[in-house]
Image: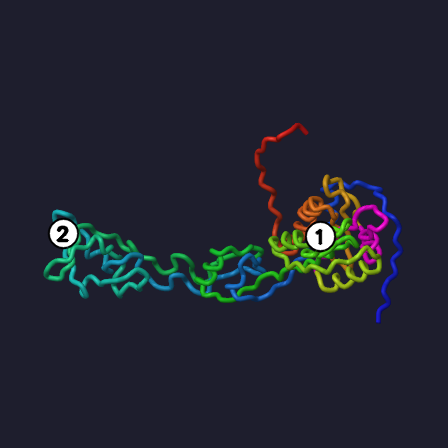
Amino acid sequence: MQKRKTIEHKRNVYLTDVPYQHALSTLLAEFAGTVMGPKTLPVTECLDRVTAAPVFAELSSPHYHAAAMDGVAVNAESTFGARETAPKTLKPGVDAFWIDTGEPLPPRTNAVIMVEDIHETKEGLLEIIHPVSPWEHVRVYGEDLVETELILPSNHRLRPIDLGAILAGGITKISVRKKPVVTIIPTGSELVTPGEKPEPGQVIEFNSTVLSSLVKTWGANPVIHPVVPDNLSDIQEAVTAAVGQSDIVLISAGSSAGSEDYTSTVIGGLGKLFVHGVSTRPGKPVVLGSIQNKPAIGIPGYPVSAVLATELFVKPLVFGFLGLPVLEPRPITATLSRNI
């Protein structure tokens, strides 16, 4: 059995106030090129997944000339010259064939006359007063997709319409990126689980639910660890176990400079500490590091700071692991209620 590494804790004092962009660049540079591996899944299970390889059509869509309207299929040439003053008559089963939308065109036909443009005579003939052009009201072979055509590139987050296009191309399984596993470890002897009535000095632990929901919307698989009390060895044990089962580890709370704030000590003791303290307000007490070449991030305990720090540092990591760029926030115009 491997002997657990002993870590000595000393109260942390901020020696630096690292600019946000520098802190983020330091973190991302350490994991540049780290992308999740591929996984083959049924297309029906791939909503919001990210393609790990280009997707090419295996079947044209439609794979036959199909009627785009209800009516009769004809050879367009047989309708030329039809007008109100000189209607043309067509004989069903000879030069006009009743057809419904989506059905294949009969041989030697190349157009469809809509049913509302047809007058049926007492003799059973079909009278028309307008000609049709070749391929009018027809969905031609390969109109949507052509066999071997690129449907989607790699590193594309799949939308509902994308799944339809892939299935239309005759594909039922595709290669997508595995979801990075993000373990969230809430720490604090004062924390109680939701549903328990907190005593004075106790706090309901809800940050892990907020953070797990965030990383889930970004495409990762969150895992919430049970609450760990403010005990150095307990936190060390929880982090060590999480690193072995996760791609990213978040330690919630304990990232500041208090006597029982152990996050930076644990990360530095088990791995490498890049940054402790970032010039963001709120969210200054952020800890950035790595353990066994995996990101280990200390998230502040205050809820607003926790959300901001996760947005600023964890989101770019998750997107990078999925091979996606992080979109710039959309600016909006607002009126402040007071001077700042």
**Image location of residue 270, percent across then percent down:** 82, 58
Give the amino acid at mark 1.
Ile
Give the amino acid at mark 2.
Pro
User: Alpha-carbon neighbours of circle 2 within 10 Å: few (<14), some, or many (≥20)?
Assistant: some
Residue 221 seen: yes
* Residue pointed to by mark 1: 204
Cα–Cα gap, marks 2 and 1 = 81 Å
Q: Earlier in the sequence, mark 2 or mark 1?
A: 2
User: Alpha-carbon neighbours of circle 1 within 10 Å: few (<14), some, or many (≥20)?
Assistant: some
Mark in front: 2 vs 1: 1
* Residue pointed to by mark 2: 87
Residue closest to the far top: 339
Q: Secondary structure at mark 1?
A: strand
* Nearer to us in this view, 18 or 187: 187
Q: Which disc, if any, is residue 40?
A: none
Residue 295 seen: no
* Residue at 84%, 53% in the rendered image: 265
Q: Quadrant of residue 175?
A: bottom right
Q: Quick one: quadrant of the N terminus?
A: bottom right
Residue closest to the far bottom: 1
Magenta span covers which residues?
Answer: 247-273
